[in-house]
Amino acid sequence: MAKKFKFELQDILDFRNFEKEGAEGELAKALAVENEINNNLKIIAAQFLALKQKKDKMSSIEELSAASTHKKFLEYQKEELLKQLAQAQIVTEEKRAVLAEIMKKTTALEKLKEKETAAYKEAVDKEEADLIDDLANRRV
C-alpha cells in the first residue's frame, strides 16, 4: 500500500494560517476603534441637536453664553474625533493591506496543497488499479 499523504510545506501553511488569524484580529481591533469613534461622533451630533433645541428656548444672557461655550466645546470635540477617525482609517487600511498580503500567500500554499493532494490521490488510484489488474491477471 502507498504511504499516507504528507504535504511538505504543512508547517509553513500552518504558520501562514496563524499569521492570517492574527492579522484578522488586528483588523477587527482597528475596525472597532473606528466604530467607537463614529459612535462618539453620533453622540456629539445628538448633543448639537439638543443644544440647538434648548438654545431656541433660552432667554437670559448667561444661558446663551453657556450654550455658546458648550457649542464651542462640542465643535472642538468633533474636530478631535475627526482627526482620530482619519488616523484610525489609515491604520485600518494598513491592517487590510497586511491581511490581503498574508491571504495571498496562504491561498497560494493552499492551492499547492490541493494540487499535490489530487496528484497523490491519482497516483494511489493508479497503483490500486494496477494492483487489481495484476491480481486479476494472475488468476487466469
Image (spheres, helix red, strand yellow):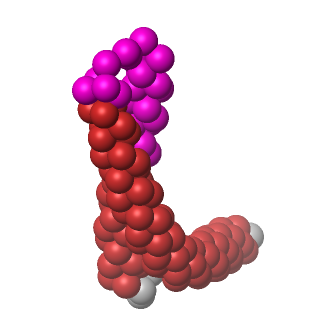
> What is the x, y in percent for residue 101?
52, 80
Q: Tell me if residue 107 comes above or below residue 67 in the rendering.
A: below
Magenta span: chief secondary structure? helix
Which residue is situated farthest in the front direction here? 61
Any magenta on residue 11? no
Which residue corresponds to the image point at 52% horizontal and 76% vertical from the top-left?
97
> What is the x, y in percent for residue 55?
42, 21
Which residue corresponds to the image point at 36% horizontal and 37% vertical from the top-left?
68
In this image, 66 relative to 43: left or right? left
Which residue is situated farthest in the top direction here? 57
Q: Nearer the viewer, residue 63 or 1?
A: 63
Which residue is situated farthest in the bottom direction here? 8
Residue 131 appears in view: no
Quadrant containing the C terminus in the rendered view: bottom right
Which residue corresponds to the image point at 30% horizontal and 41% vertical from the top-left?
69
Q: Tell me if residue 114 comes above or below residue 30 in the rendering.
A: below
In this image, 6 relative to 139: left or right? left
Q: Nearer the viewer, residue 10 or 123?
A: 10
Q: What segment is highlighted magenta in the picture? A: 38-64
> What is the x, y in percent for residue 63?
29, 24
In this image, 53 relative to 66: left or right? right
How many labels, in total? Answer: 0
Q: Nearer the viewer, residue 75 or 37?
A: 75
Residue 72 appears in view: yes
Which residue corresponds to the image point at 46% horizontal and 65% vertical from the top-left?
86
Any magenta on residue 46? yes
> What is the x, y in percent for residue 36?
35, 45
